[in-house]
Image: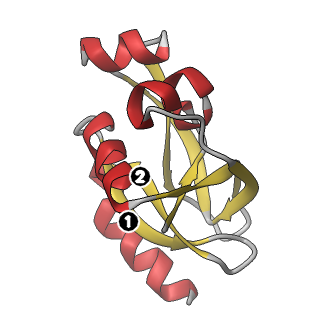
Amino acid sequence: MHRLFSYGTLRDPAVQQGVFGRDVVTVDAALRGFRLGWVTITDPGVIAMSGTDRHRIVRPGDPSDVVDGAYLELTDDELRAADDYEVDDYVRVAAALASGERVWVYVAATDAAHAATTTADRE
């Protein structure tokens, strides 16, 4: 199983049904060192599933920054489905939650290299 931290639409039961074909149990969690921003989505399928073209996105921030969300426990196939759902604005990277647990998280593609370095520095 994979743990995927979500701070946005993947916590929505309707999106989970569309992406995974089931409701996924979510566990409240926090991601330190990142900050929330917004991105405008242009993919019609993602907009239809989520109901909006305005989605949250995370970028590296200060060590004191915290993004609240939840992690989802996903199979290999479900993780690939999440990758397919996320548009090119996002890249999946490994990160550590405030609790120290390791997760995957989608970050702004423009910040992916910095996010990976920042995450490695915190370990």
Q: Where does residue 30 sit, x and y in percent of width and height?
A: 72, 59
Q: Is residue 108 left or right of residue 102?
A: left
The residue nearer to you, when weighing 72 against 37, is: 72
* Disc 2 packing (10 Å; few <14; some 14–19; many ≥20): many
Residue displayed at 75% across by 75% down: 99
Are circles 2 and 1 on residues that touch, CB within 8 Å?
yes
The residue nearer to you, when weighing 117 against 55, is: 55
Q: Is residue 78 left or right of residue 56?
A: left
Disc 1 element: strand
Gap between marks 2 and 1 measured at Cα:
7 Å
Residue displayed at 25% across by 18% down: 43
Which kind of residue does numbered mark 2 sit on? Val
Q: Which residue is mark 2?
A: 107
Q: Where does residue 76 sit, x and y in percent of width and height?
A: 34, 61
Q: Is residue 62 left or right of residue 49?
A: right
Residue displayed at 74% across by 58% down: 29
| Mark identifier at residue 82 | none
Q: Where does residue 113 sit, x and y in percent of width and height?
A: 29, 68
Above-or-below relation of 44 to 106: above
Which kind of residue does numbered mark 1 sit on? Val
Residue displayed at 69% across by 48% down: 26
Q: Which residue is mark 1?
A: 93
